[in-house]
Image: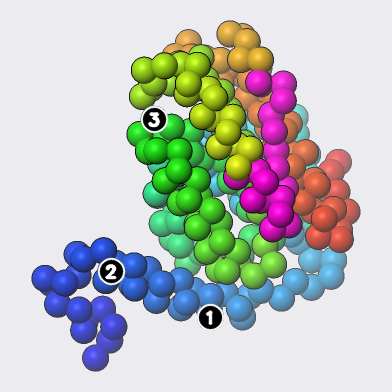
């Protein structure tokens, strides 16, 4: 009898059973991916960009720019894959990773930009803990992957904020905590320094999403992070 069939309907919804099932699925994926994990020198590197609407809008903007959705990287050397999901919350990140792992080539570099939609909806402690936990699981799933953490960008308006100044302090602290964790484990942090000023011209009319100019800056920052990750892996920048 299979693992799933062995769980009756009454127990299937319990948190412990859900946790065990997720662990089982992850292990199966690890075994499957291990057969695809060997990188042949000179072959194409695979880069995933995964996150909420900033990534989705970044892909849309990149598609009409000269550099294209490859962000200037040579398509013969690097394959850039965009996975942006509007409204994505951090608890959904791991589910997206697992779903994509079933159908996509294993990433050598994984750029993550998520968590901003959770600010105010989750406690800072719970959010940081969940992020660290999932980043470790992603590393376990994709052996040798370089994680690029794209810091959460400040907003003129935060959906769940009662105190905008307190929300901004929380964002900065969370970025600092997760950034240190990513660096200590061999990853790359993208800081988006130019967007820290939160100039109105960098934001769309809703004061949450980035404007065309802001998105161009965002994409340039992502490209820089990807370039640093590829160099860290011992390769070339591979940009045109």
Badge 1 local density, few (<14 within 10 Å), some, or many (20+)?
A: few
Say which quarter of the image contains residue 184: bottom right
Q: Which residue is mark 1?
A: 31
| Rendering coords of residue 113 (x, y %) | 56, 40
> Quick one: 203 or 119, which is closer to the camera?
119
Judge from the rendering whether residue 195 lies leftward or rightward of residue 98; answer left or right: right
Per the model, the C-alpha gap separating discs 3 and 1 is 37 Å
Per the model, the C-alpha gap separating discs 3 and 2 is 27 Å
Q: Is residue 144 above or below residue 100?
A: below
Label 3 or label 1, whichever lies nearer to me, is: 3
Residue 148 seen: no
What's the residue at 66%, 21% (across, down)? 195
Judge from the rendering whether residue 110 lies leftward or rightward of residue 165; answer left or right: right
Report the span colored magenta.
178-196
| Rendering coords of residue 71 (x, y %) | 73, 38
Q: Is residue 107 above or below residue 40?
A: above
Q: Is residue 143 above or below residue 151?
A: below
> Judging from the image, what secondary structure is the residue with disc 2 in?
helix
Q: Which of the image's four quarters has the C terminus?
A: top right
| Rendering coords of residue 44 (x, y %) | 76, 61
What's the residue at 86%, 61% (across, down)? 234
| Rendering coords of residue 70 (x, y %) | 71, 42
Mark 3 and mark 1 lie on one chain; the one further toward the N terminus is: 1
Q: Which residue is mark 2?
A: 16
What's the residue at 39%, 76% (across, down)? 24
Magenta includes 111? no
């Amino acid at each position: 009898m299979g693992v799933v069939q062995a769980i009756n309907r009454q127990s299937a919804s319990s948190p412990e059973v859900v946790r065990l099932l997720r662990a089982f699925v992850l292990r199966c994926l690890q075994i499957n991916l291990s057969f695809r994990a060997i990188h042949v020198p000179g072959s194409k590197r695979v880069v995933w960009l995964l996150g909420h609407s900033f990534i989705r809008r970044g892909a849309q903007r990149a598609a009409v720019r000269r550099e294209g959705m490859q962000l200037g990287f040579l398509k013969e050397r690097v394959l850039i894959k965009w996975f942006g999901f509007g409204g994505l919350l951090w608890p959904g990140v791991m589910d997206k990773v697992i779903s994509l792992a079933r159908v996509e080539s294993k990433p050598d570099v994984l750029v993550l930009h998520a968590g901003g939609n959770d600010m105010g909806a989750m406690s800072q402690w719970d959010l940081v803990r969940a992020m660290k936990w999932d980043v470790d699981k992603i590393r376990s799933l994709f052996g040798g992957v370089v994680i690029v953490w794209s810091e959460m960008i400040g907003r003129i308006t935060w959906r769940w904020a009662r105190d905008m100044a307190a929300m901004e302090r929380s964002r900065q602290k969370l970025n600092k905590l997760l950034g240190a964790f990513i660096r200590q484990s061999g990853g790359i942090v993208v800081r988006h320094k130019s967007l820290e000023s939160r100039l109105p011209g960098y934001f769309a009319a809703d004061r949450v999403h980035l404007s065309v100019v802001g998105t161009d800056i965002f994409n340039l920052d992502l490209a820089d992070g990807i370039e640093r990750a590829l160099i860290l892996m011992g390769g070339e920048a591979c940009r045109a």
